[in-house]
Image (cartoon, rainbow, N blue to C red):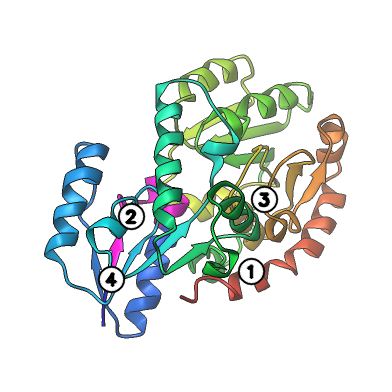
Amino acid sequence: MRYVILARNLDSKAGGISVYGRNLIKKLEAKGIDVIISPKEKFSYFKWLLFDVPIFILKTDADVYHAIGIIEGILLPFIKPRAKKYLTVHDLIPLKYKGRGFRKILERFLVRLGLFSARFYDKIFAVSHLTKLDVIRFGGIDENKIEVVYQPIDDKFLKTPTSGKRHKTFNIGYISRMEAYKRHELLIKLFMKYKNPNARLYLAGTGPLFKKIQKLAEEDKRIILLGFVPDDKIVEFYDMLDVYIHPSKYEGWGLPIVEATARKKPVIIFEDAEIPREVKYLCLSIDFNIINPLISNLKYLKKVGVIKNKAWRRIYENSICH
């Protein structure tokens, strides 16, 4: 069996989609399936979408074609109308959070094209029930065509022994692409009100707002920007934390939350966050105003973390079974 994966980039910098893609490939190859991966995007996204992918699809014969992102799969149904086609949708945040600027307008346009194209797929995989509901709501797609398959974490989060090293500081962390809806600025402002001189806030990730966040963080020496954290350091990042806080307003899944929970860290989110119930259940959901007294009570947080931690394994066990 020949199985084609359409993916722009499977490197760690591509985020959750790349994690999903790598795990899917691993599972398919373990079953003895011949996996063929599309060319990687190198110079231009539009060149990849409009030229590299169509040429690759036309030259390739396979039993199944699987686009692992909604934009990646826009042209597939029209190039291979009779082939068996799968599509994975991670989120529809561009349609829910309408950021400003040409890039955001273009992104919304491409996502809407992707939803139209999705009507012609044989099966759609959504990474959460929330994403499934969004696909039905925004795309008008038959719910019977959509299957929820949770996004897995890498095995290293399970196999690497939990670090028992104690730190002299009280460490809070957040890892995410720096976009407005991820609400790094809100977290920084709340942290600045937390007057514990022994506390540290570690922010990992890059993105269009990096320089703005960097400038804001300069006002408090307790805030450390780590930039991009490579794959071989990601477990170490979680292990150095006492608390993981994920202030994002929207998530299609929330992979860092599951990773942090797997590393036995208490996870805090905010009550107004739109996060899938499967992942939200793992977190302590609070109001902005009580974050400072709460994070001061590490004993309570650890107790909550242990209780929540017992629920996460069913997510891991139910992930990616295409």
Q: Which residue is mark 3?
A: 166
Q: Where the N terminus falls, by quadrant?
A: bottom left
Write the residue at 67% across / 73% down: 314
- Farthest residue in the bottom direction? 32
Instruction: Measuring from the top left, give residue 121's x and y in whole percent.
Output: 40, 64
Residue segment shown in magenta: 4-18
Q: Earlier in the sequence, mark 4 or mark 3?
A: 4
Q: Earlier in the sequence, mark 2 or mark 1?
A: 2
Query: Can residue 302 be seen in the rendering of this structure?
Result: yes
1 or 3: mark nearer the eye: 1
| Amino acid marked by disc 3 | Arg
| Amino acid marked by disc 2 | Leu
Q: Which residue is mark 1?
A: 315
Instruction: Measuring from the top left, give residue 268's x and y in whole percent.
Output: 74, 45
In this rendering, position of residue 94 left or right of residue 272:
left
Instruction: Measuring from the top left, give residue 227's x and y in whole percent.
Output: 45, 34
Q: Earlier in the sequence, mark 1 or mark 3?
A: 3
2 or 3: mark nearer the eye: 2
Q: Which residue is mark 4?
A: 83
Q: Which residue is mark 2?
A: 10
